[in-house]
Structures are given as structure tokens and as C-alpha cells.
Image (cartoon, coloured by chain):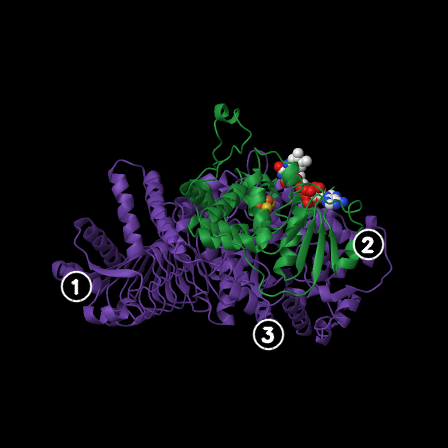
Amino acid sequence: MRNLLDFKDRESIPVEEVEPVSSIVKRFKTGAMSFGSLSKEAHETLAIAMNRIGGKSNSGEGGEDPKRYAPDANGDLRRSAIKQIASGRFGVKSHYLIHADELQIKMAQGAKPGEGGQLPGNKVYPWVADVRGSTPGVGLISPPPHHDIYSIEDLAQLIYDLKNANREARISVKLVAKSGIGTIAAGVAKGKADVISVSGYDGGTGASPRTSIKHTGLPWELGLAETHQTLMLNNLRERVVLETDGKLMTGKDVVMAALLGAEEFGFATAPLVVLGCVMMRVCHKDTCPVGIATQNPELREKFMGNADHVVNFMHYIAQEVREIMAMLGFRTIEEMIGRTDILTISERAKVHWKAKDLDLSTLIYRVDGGRTCQTKQDHQLQRSLDESAILPMVLSIIEQNEKVDITYNIKNTHRAVGTITGSEITKRYGEEGMVEDAITLRFNGSAGQSFGAYVPKGMTLRLTGDANDYVGKGLSGGKIIISSPPEAKSAESGNIIIGNVALYGATTGEAYINGYAGERFAVRNSGANAVVEGIGDHGCEYMTGGRVVILGDVGKNFAAGMSGGIAYILTEDPEKFDVLCNKEMVAIETVSDPMELEEVKRLIQNHYHYTASQKARFVLSHWNGSMQKLVKVIPRDFRHMQEQIQTYKNAGMSDREAALHAFELKKKNAVGNQNLKTSTVVPL
Amino acid sequence: MGKLTGFMDYAREEVEEREARHRISDWREYKAPFSDETLKRQGARCMDCGTPFCQIGEVLDGATTGCPIYNLIPEWNHLVYLEKWEEALERLLKTNNFPEFTGRVCPAPCEGSCTLAIADPAVTIKSIERTIIDKGFENGWIASRMPRNRTGKSVAIIGSGPAGLASADQLNQAGHMVTVYERQDRAGGLLMYGIPNMKLEKEVVERRVRLLEEEGIQFILNTEVGIDIHADELNEMYDAVILCTGA
Ligand SMILES: Cc1cc2nc3c(=O)[nH]c(=O)nc-3n(C[C@H](O)[C@H](O)[C@H](O)COP(=O)(O)OP(=O)(O)OC[C@H]3O[C@@H](n4cnc5c(N)ncnc54)[C@H](O)[C@@H]3O)c2cc1C
Ligand code: SF4
């Protein structure tokens, strides 16, 4: 689209007067490509290169190995400056969030708007499974929607949660070009995103279905222009930074993007080509012969990329940008942003048989007013319970690594309670956190949204009362206990005590819920253990790890897309459960292994101990009878891999070796099947 | 594309060469085509690249990279992997008039630009090509193809090297009446009088010339245009004249 536009003739200036390459490259970013889709080598090389020039690389949605958070001996940093939060929430934990300069919520991907993503099982090597909190060899699904975002208010809440999890990071929201994006972006700006990224259809094409690229995506030019203009018309432009990406390849592309309103620029395909990508289009097959989009150690050895090359590439692009700026008479990028008045429809476009019928005037429409980000969003963190009441009392205790137990009153306007405090623990003690229950915070009342989001190990939140949606979102090792008040004990079972989407994307930790939870309980849980007394629809969806014990009923579509972890359900009506459970990926079984029963018992005992649950007490006192009714839901692939790993362990292998062997066995079988398939279909 | 992991599972293999002690007693070809098994394995190494550099003949900095006649290499590699020899031949003949020549003496710029060659030995494209066509001749899949219609137009081609033969073949199949003038006593140009037998047996050239004759092309040998016959005469006798006289 940008090729239909031309620059107007303007008075040039000497190139020396234009801002230097070193400051231009700070506006450059590399695309969101996950570790898992990219090899360790490729992913880290991009990060090193971007950190060297002060630009930003993007982790993508696959989590990140904490080893990368500390600088290397030579001063290089392999940490991705941008950490992405996508619908799968893989590896999104407190530690991951704190090690970022920017947190990006991925609403969609330009080349396949509206679609989720997936990492096929044969790419889920043990080390990928590790950072994603999943099982080697078991495929992973990123669902199309974020389960905690169904409205713009929900998005605002997630922005708030993330800002609490890392107060220094900018919060970015990645949107895709579509008509109407301006309205969406206005909502996102009001929801207090610091950065809005507009992604075009021609980025990330290697990993997207051809039909989506061709028929659903739109050029970033349309999305960017609409976003920029709408934000200006609504006096919102000065509050956010605008970014764009989608096959930016040259300095001219960057200048065009700046003129249409972008302040920062993302590159993905081009830096990959610089690293040696030969456009094989086999990103999903784990056979990338240049070691970029593969995890296979044999192929990774062939990786020839080099951070210097990426640095050079970025410098060349910036230099070309400078030359064009000199020609156009701009000294700084800042003054160039949004100057659509110097764009004109190209002569070529005017006579082209098809292009000549396009009306491009709205694309270069000029609104008066501030064209770039001028003020920071006010996230109002000072009003949070953490900053106003908790931190002043516990910060010094965290610093001294001591213990505390304090009680507060809580109201439902207190959102993301505990998150900032948790981030202070993570900042100091990393993933290890503090000793169990070190920071015990008790609350009485009704908690607002995202109670205990991302709280790390060492933090225990005990709420007597009830809580809104998103309890324990992204739980990162902490403990959340929610009990009904003593005066309501008699009515506890069957009453809803917490809202929807609790424990979404939880990674580790424990939760004890003395009552019913709403819909979408423990969706995308990858390692937390929870006990609850009944849940609504879509429970344990897309779960990949952890244990969930449900002492009561479940709603419909239970365990849909669940590929890991185990759920235990004490149901009164097994036949009804059989109907409610989505059995596409899971099996329903009984529990006979005494060790496993012991584990379930321990969780229920904890539950009773923490919440004085009447139901737990009943179950424990009628243990044998209750266990007759216990059903277990376990994903078939997951069980198979676990058994395989156990077999290798029994044969004397370490955890790591066993996982790798089991994975390789599975992969070998999968490849065998694939070949069988291709040999019957001739793709001509 | 062959097998998904073929390039990791199999190493490059070369065609078999006759033993030196047998070779020294004659001048005959010393390379043999692949066996079926090897052919299949070698086809399996092809990666069916998103950007198949092998089949994109281009001149970069004065050097040819990729197949100059745009052979559909990944496609026939896949077909030989599936043991669909006849289909492979059909794909090969879509772009190549004389695979039995290129499969033996082409310098194979395709292999030079093979993606696999970035870090591993290239796919043995040329030998696969040769094996496909040799198999074709062996099994009688190559027979003369008579042009369906005649246009009533006539063409003279001066020179019977590969350039002359290829033009003759194309124009004859298009229905024109083709006459090839050659100053030597045999057709084939350097294929006949330049390239040694050990690389390209003369029977291979003759076999092709015979086929072309069967298909209606006329060869006038021992006739040097400019001396034995004047160029003006050719211009008068034919609707078009093509110069393929070599370097
Ligand atoms: C020793 C040697 C080894 C080679 N090895 C290889 C190899 O391994 N691989 C490879 O790819 N290439 C090789 N080549 C090069 C290859 O043979 C030539 O590039 C190719 O033959 C050129 O084809 P052509 O049709 O343009 O010309 P030529 O093959 O030269 O054919 C031209 C024909 O025109 C005839 N002619 C010329 N003037 C007239 C006229 N006035 N009237 C009538 N007839 C005329 C000539 O007699 C000749 O038969 C080799 C060349 C030589 C000399
Ligand atoms: S060997 Fe065959 S495929 Fe390769 S460049 Fe020569 S003619 Fe083309």
C-alpha cells in the first residue's frame, strides 16, 4: 500500500544534521517470535543484538529461561526487553514479568487475526516444555481469545494487573489492522495502555495459514492511519506511543510508517533472513535446515546467525532512514511522525489500471494537534491497597527476608491486591521467592478483581469473605485461601464465593476456595494445585499442568483442550459428569493408586485445615465412601508421556534424560506417521 | 519434497563409477545411473524449500545460479521418492528437451544453489535427473512423438549442437517443418565432437538424433552454410532461419 504513495518535493538538508543512527535504532524492535518456535540460538541472538543497540527484542509467547535475565560475562544481555502475554500465558509468571521493559498483550497476530496458535508436540522438546510449564511431546494450544478478556474493561484490568506486576514496564497492546481499529485503539488508550502496536497482514506469514494471510489480514498502513487519526480526534494520541510492524524491510518503509503516525517500528522477517532464514516455510515442522525455527539439536548446530549481522542490518536501515529524512528536510523522527501532509498519491498509482480507482485520501488525511506521545498514562497505582497500605508495612520485612502476618479490611474497589507486594519479593528473590507463609496477609471483606494476581512463593493471602473475577491470575508460587465467614458457614456449599476465570494461567502455588467458583476455573493452569467446592462452565480448559480437586459439581465443557495436569472430581452424579466433560483429549478414570489417593487426601486436608470447610470435613470423615465417587480426568497424551518418562526413570535415568528419551521416542513415532501420510498424497 | 527428515537421515551418495583398472582399457562412460533404492533415498533428501533456489535459473554477478532451464526439481525429487518413475519423467520432460545430455554433462548450477548445500552436501540433482531419463529409455517410455498438426511453415536451423537440436525439437513439436544444416558429417555439435565419450557416449547423442529424425526433422550434414549454400538461399527457401553455430 505504501508503494502507492510518494514523498512531496521538499527542501533538503545535509544528512549530518539529522539525528544519529544510534538514537534512531532505539525505536526499533524485533517481532514477537516465541522461544519454542525459534531455537535458543536464534532467539538469544536477536535479544543480544537488540540489547546492544538499545532497541527491543520480543520474547513472543513462549516464556523465557530465567538464566537469560543476568548479563553474560562479556556484557551481552540475552534477556528480551519485551515480554509478551498471549492467550496461552505460557511461562507468564511474576519472575518473567519483572524482567521486562515492556509487557505486550497480544490481542491478535496480523497475518492471522482471530486465530490462536499452536506448537505441535514434536517441537515441544523438554527444554521448551520447561519454560512453558508443560509436558514434553504434548502439543500446546494458544486459544484464540484471552480467557480473561471479553470486553474492553477486561483488557483494562489486565493492563492494570501487569502494571502492578512490573511498575517500571510500559504496557503495550498489540492489535491488528482492520477497519474499526481506531475505535478499538481509543478504548485501549482509555484502558491505559502505554503503547499500541498495529500489526499488518504481511508479517509473521511463515507461521500462518495461507488462507488467513490472503483473506483476513489487512495492510498495516490502513490500520496505522486509522488508529493515529482516531486517537488524535479523541485527544488520546498524546497519551500513547504508536508502533507498527508487518514486513518492514527498508528505510523507506520506516519513513512511510513514521509519516503515517508510527513512533516505533517492528521487524521480524528481515532480521531472521539476516540470521540465515532461507524462507523454507517449514517453521512448524521442526526441520528448519538453518537452525532458526527448530529445536532439533542436530539442526541447531547449523545455525550461522550472528548478533553483529543483526546490529549491522539495523544500522543500515537507520542510515537509510536518515538519508531519506535529509532529503525531506527532517532533523528528528519526532518531527516527522504523522506528517501525512508531505505524502501524495504516486504518479504510478494514478495511472495504474486498478490502483487508480482507489481513494487514498483518507489514508493521508491530516488532523491538527499533538502527533506523538507527550504524557504518561496515569495508572493510579498510588491508590492501590498495596502502595497505600501494604507496602509501607511489609517492604522492609521483605528486604530483611523476615516474616510478617497482618490483617486488612478489603473492598471490591481494591484490585490486584498483593501483586505489587509480590513483585517486590520477586525483584529480590527471583523465582525462589521467600519461605512459605513469610508474608501472610489476611483480609476481611469483598476483594476486587485479580485478587492475588501473580503472587510469588512466600506470600500467603487469606481472605475471609468473597472475591471478584480473576482470583490468583498467573499465580506464581503463592498461596491463596478464601474462606466463607464463620457466620455463613452453614450456607457455604453451593454458594458462589469467587468470580470467573480464577487461576487463569497459574504456574505454581496453591489455592483453597471454600465455596463455588464461577466459570472458566483454572483455565491454562500449568502447575498450581487447587481445591474448590464446585465450579461453573469450561473448567480446566486448556490446562497443561497442576492438580485441581473439585469437591462438588462442574459446569459444561469441562476439560476442553486440556493437555496436561489432572483434575479430581467428587461428584454425586457420575453420569451427569460424563456428559459435562469434554472428552476430546481426556480420559475419565477411577483412582486406585494408594500414593495418588494419599496426595488427593493431603490436598483436601489442607483445604480443611485452612478454610474449616464443612464439605472437606465430611469427605475426610467418610473417606472410603467418598473415594468410591472420586473420578479422575487426565489427558491421554499427557498420561502416555508421563508413563513413558516414568519407565525410563525406573530404568535408572535422571529426570532430564528420561524426559528427553520419552520425547524422542514420541517424535520418532510421529515422524513415522507423517511420512506415511505424505507418501499417499502427491502434492502436485 | 521427499521425506520430511530425509536430509537428516541420509547422506549424499554419488553414482557408481567403474573401477579404474577396467576404465583404462577403453574410452567408454565410467558412471552408471543410480539403483532404484539409492535413487529413492537421494530423492528423499530434497527439502521442498519454500523458495526453491535450485529451479530458479538466474545470473548473479555473471555466474549462473539455479537451473537455467527451470527444471521442476523438487517435484521430480518427490516423485522418485514415491517411486513414481513415469510421473517423474513426465515432470522432467516438461522443461527439459534432452535430460540425457544435461543429466550427464551439465555443470549443475542447481546443486550449487541447493539450500541444503548451505551446511551439507547438496541433493544429487544431476544424477537423479540422469537416472530418471535413463530409466525412461530403458523401459520404452521415450518414443517418438509426432506433432499433431503441421503449420505449413518451415524453419532452417544452422548448427546441430544442443542449441540447434533443442530449437529443432521445440519448433517441430509446434508443427513447423524443420531442417537442420550441419557442416560436420554427424549431428550433435560439441556433444559429438567436443565432449569426450567417457562423459557422454556418442550413442546417447545418436539415439536422440534418430528420435528427432523419426519425428520429422530433416538433417542435412556435410553442408557449411556460407560456403556450400548461401545464406540468402536459405532466407528464400524458409520462413525463418535460426543460427545455432556455437561460440
Ligand atoms: C572439450 C569440451 C568439453 C566440454 N564439456 C562440457 C561438459 O562436460 N558439460 C557442459 O555442459 N558443456 C561442456 N562443453 C561445452 C558444451 O559442449 C557447449 O557449451 C555446447 O555444445 C554449445 O552448444 P551449441 O549448440 O551452442 O554449439 P555447438 O555444440 O558448438 O554446435 C554448433 C554446431 O554448429 C555447426 N556449425 C557452425 N557453423 C556452421 C555453419 N556455417 N554451417 C553449418 N554448421 C555450422 C558446428 O559444426 C557445430 O556442430 C564442452 C566443450 C568442449 C569443447
Ligand atoms: S543438472 Fe539438470 S537440473 Fe541441474 S542445472 Fe543442469 S539441467 Fe538443470
- Contact between marks 1 and 3 (CB within 8 A): the answer is no
Q: Please state the horizontal and vertical placement of residue A120, each as a whole percent of the image.
A: 41, 54
Question: Pointer 2 indicates a residue of which chain?
Answer: B
Q: Please state the horizontal and vertical placement of residue A394, each as a whole percent of the image.
A: 45, 51
Select label 3 or label 2 by which is in front.
Answer: 2
Residue with the mark numbered 1 = A629
Q: Nearer the viewer, residue A387 or A130?
A: A130
Q: Tag count in the figure?
A: 3
Image disc number at residue A180: 3
User: Quick one: SS at disc 2?
Assistant: helix
Q: CA separation, marks 1 and 3?
A: 52 Å
User: Quick one: SS at disc 1?
Assistant: loop
In the figure, residue B175 lies in which quadrant? bottom right
Tell me if the residue at label 1 has its CB under 8 Å from ligand 2.
no
Q: Label 2: few (<14), some or many (≥20) within 10 Å?
A: few
Q: Is residue A662 visible?
A: yes
Q: Please state the horizontal and vertical placement of residue A469, each as a whole percent of the image.
A: 40, 67
Q: Which chain is green?
A: B
Q: In this image, A512 relative to B238: left or right?
A: left
Looking at the picture, does residue A345 appear above or below residue A422?
Answer: below
Q: CA separation, marks 3 and 2?
A: 72 Å
- Name the quarter where the N terminus of chain A is drawn: bottom right
Q: Residue at x 31, y 53 (%)?
A: A638
Ligand 2 position by quadrant: top right
Residue with the mark numbered 2 = B232
Q: In this image, A415 relative to A531: left or right?
A: right
User: Quick one: SS at disc 3?
Assistant: loop
Chain A's colour?
A: purple
